[in-house]
Image (spheres, helix red, strand yellow):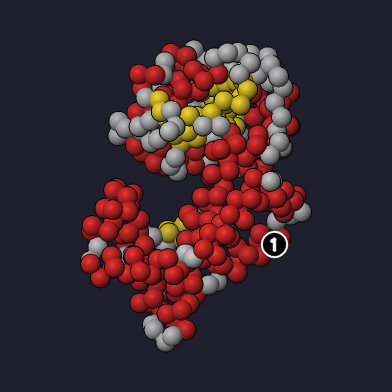
C-alpha cells in the first residue's frame, strides 16, 4: 500500500521560507502559483516574452519575469511547461541557474524518466503531481479543501527533499486530501498508461466505435450521441463518488445485467494484451521516443490526426446538440483556442 501524507505530516513554514519560481502559467501553473501565494509563499512566475499569460498572471496579482530571471532568483523552481517543451526550456533558461542547494520540481515525471532532463548532482529533484486539472486544484483550494496528489523524490542532495516537497504540497492544498508517495518512474508510466489505455485513448475509441455501430445500423446520430457520449458523464460521476459498486447500485437492473454480461465481450483478453503492449512501449521508452521525434519533426502527423478527429461525425453532431444545453456551459475548440459555443 502507498504511504500517504496529510496536513499533520507537512510543515508549511519550509516552503514559506523559500523563494519559489513557477515556470508556466497554464492549467497547473496558475493554480500552483495562486495557491502558494495565498499560503504565504513568495512566488514569481516565469514566462517567455510575449506570452499572452503575462497579462493574466499580472492581473491575478503575481509578479512575472522571464524564465531565466525567476530561475536565477528562486530557491525552488517548479517546471510546469508541457512535456514536449520542458527540456528545451530547462536547458536554455533553468539549467544555467541551478546552483547547489536549489530544488528543481515537476508535476509529471516524463522528462526525468526518459532523461531529456538530467539535473546536476547538487540539487534536489522532486515531484508534486495533483490528481486533478489545474482549475479544480484552484477551485477546491479556495473552498477550503484540496485534491489528492502524488509526491516523489528523484534526487535528495540536501537530505530534506521529501520534507520540502510535502511542504509545497501543503501550500497548494493537497495534503488536505492526502499525498501518496511514489517514484518518478511509477508516476510517469502509470500516468501515460492511464491516458492511453483508458482515460483518453481507450474511452475516445470506445465512444466513436459505439457511435459508428449505431449510425451504420440506421439509428439517428443524435440519439447515438446521447447514448454513447452525453450519458457517459452520468456513469463516470457515479464511479467517481462510489466506485463501480455505487454505479451499479444506481443504475437499472437491466443496465447492471448488461454490464456484467456484455463488458467482458468488449474488453476481451485480446484487449488486455493490447494494453500490455502499450505498457511495454511506455516502459521501454518507445512511446516517449516517438513522441519526442514527432515534436522535433514539426508535429505534422499529430496535426493531421487532430484535424481528422475534429471532423468525425460525433463531433459535428455533438456541437449542434450542446448549443441547446446552456447548462453544460458548452465550449468549442477553434484554431487551438477554447471559445464559448
Left or right relative to 90: residue 311 = left
Relative image position of residue 138 (x, y in whole percent): 40, 36
Specify whether residue 22 is in view.
Answer: no
> Quarter-wise, where is residue 236 in the image?
bottom left
Residue that lies at the very extreme toward the right in this rendered image? 297
- Quadrant in the picture for residue 65: top right
Image point (72%, 48%), residue name: 289
Camera-side residue of 228 and 133: 228
Q: What is the x, y in percent for residue 79?
A: 60, 32
**Residue bearing mark 1:** 301
On screen, 220 above or below 34? below
Residue that appears at 41% across and 28% down: 4
Vertically, is 201 above or below 52? below
Locate the C terminus by quadrant.
Answer: bottom left
Residue 100 visible (yes or no)? yes
Q: Residue at x 40, y 35 (%)?
A: 148
Q: Is residue 241 above or below residue 207?
A: above
- The residue at the far front in this view is 269
Quarter of the rendering occupied by the N terminus: top left
119 sits to left or right of 189: right
The x, y position of residue 154, in whole percent, is 61, 26
Residue 278, quarter of the rendered image: bottom right
Disc 1 element? helix
Amino acid at each position: 500500500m502507498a504511504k500517504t501524507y496529510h496536513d499533520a505530516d507537512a510543515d508549511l513554514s519550509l516552503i514559506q521560507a523559500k523563494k519559489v519560481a513557477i515556470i508556466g502559467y497554464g492549467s497547473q501553473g496558475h493554480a500552483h502559483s495562486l495557491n502558494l501565494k495565498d499560503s504565504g509563499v513568495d512566488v514569481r512566475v516565469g514566462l517567455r516574452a510575449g506570452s499572452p499569460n503575462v497579462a493574466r498572471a499580472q492581473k491575478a496579482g503575481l509578479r512575472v519575469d522571464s524564465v531565466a530571471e525567476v530561475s536565477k532568483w528562486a530557491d525552488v523552481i517548479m517546471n510546469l511547461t508541457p512535456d514536449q517543451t520542458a527540456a528545451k526550456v530547462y536547458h536554455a533558461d533553468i539549467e544555467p541557474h541551478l546552483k547547489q542547494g536549489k530544488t528543481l520540481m515537476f508535476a509529471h515525471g516524463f522528462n526525468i524518466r526518459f532523461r531529456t532532463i538530467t539535473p546536476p548532482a547538487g540539487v534536489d529533484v522532486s515531484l508534486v503531481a495533483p490528481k486533478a486539472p489545474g482549475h479544480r486544484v484552484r477551485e477546491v483550494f479556495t473552498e477550503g479543501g484540496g485534491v489528492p496528489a502524488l509526491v516523489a523524490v528523484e534526487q535528495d542532495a540536501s537530505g530534506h527533499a521529501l520534507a520540502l516537497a510535502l511542504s509545497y504540497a501543503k501550500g497548494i492544498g493537497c495534503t488536505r486530501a492526502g499525498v501518496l508517495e511514489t517514484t518518478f518512474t511509477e508516476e510517469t508510466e502509470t500516468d501515460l498508461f492511464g491516458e492511453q489505455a483508458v482515460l483518453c485513448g481507450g474511452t475516445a475509441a470506445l465512444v466513436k466505435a459505439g457511435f459508428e455501430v449505431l449510425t451504420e445500423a440506421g439509428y439517428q446520430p443524435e440519439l447515438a450521441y446521447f447514448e454513447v457520449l452525453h450519458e457517459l458523464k452520468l456513469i463516470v460521476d457515479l464511479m467517481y463518488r462510489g466506485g463501480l459498486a455505487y454505479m451499479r447500485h444506481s443504475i437499472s437492473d437491466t443496465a447492471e445485467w448488461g454490464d456484467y454480461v456484455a463488458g467482458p465481450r468488449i474488453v476481451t483478453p485480446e484487449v488486455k494484451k493490447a494494453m500490455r503492449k502499450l505498457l511495454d512501449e511506455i516502459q521501454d521508452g518507445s512511446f516517449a521516443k516517438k513522441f519526442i521525434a514527432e515534436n522535433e519533426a514539426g508535429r505534422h502527423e499529430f496535426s493531421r490526426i487532430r484535424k481528422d478527429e475534429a471532423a468525425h461525425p460525433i463531433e459535428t453532431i455533438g456541437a449542434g446538440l450542446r448549443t441547446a444545453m446552456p447548462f453544460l456551459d458548452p465550449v468549442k475548440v477553434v484554431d487551438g483556442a477554447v471559445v464559448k459555443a
